[in-house]
Image: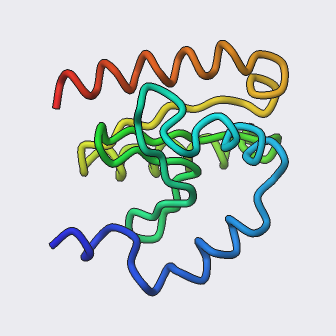
Amino acid sequence: AMTKHFNKSSETPKRKWLRNNAPNVERKLWQHLKSKQLADVKFRRQYSVDAFVIDFYAPSCKLGIEIDGDTHFTQDALEYDRKRSRYIAQFGIEIIRFTNADVYKNIEGVLGRIEEVAQRRSSEL
């Protein structure tokens, strides 16, 4: 039943393209998330829930991480992101968002917040 919504094969080309063309900010964060470096949690890159692709996702605690570049701050984009997050939340997934500037200027703060939320989610599930 999981495959009905998660990482559908129809979305594979999109996920692969996003991974191969990831912005530098995502590459920077991935260096800290890959190989269970943070809170011993396994993160995946470009994980899809139906047509929506989450930048980073930890299945064990149902935590999604989004990095928002400049394109996310228009009124339309903000509304789209809200709808998208509400849709994904139906699957019990919590999305936390960071800006490019957060990752570049305060990586320790970003990692601390991710770890904090991952630990809270793990204890709740």
In-image side of 52 versus 120 (left or right): right
Disc tally is 0
Q: Residue at x 75, y 28 (%)?
A: 103
The C terminus lies in quadrant: top left
The N terminus lies in quadrant: bottom left
Q: Residue at x 20, y 21 (%)?
A: 123
Q: Residue at x 40, y 71 (%)?
A: 7
Colouring used for the render:
rainbow
Say which quarter of the image contains residue 28. Answer: top right
Q: Residue at x 75, y 69 (%)?
A: 20
Indicate the position of residue 118 as horizontal and vertical percent values: 38, 26
In-image side of 102 versus 37 (left or right): right
Q: 75 or 87: nearer the eye?
A: 87
In-image side of 67 versus 24 (left or right): left
Q: Residue furthest bottom?
A: 10
Indicate the position of residue 70 as horizontal and vertical percent values: 82, 41
Q: 76 or 5: nearer the eye?
A: 5
In-image side of 74 versus 111 (left or right): right
Seen in the picture, residue 24 relative to 17 is either above or below; the reply is above
Indicate the position of residue 29 as horizontal and vertical percent values: 69, 37
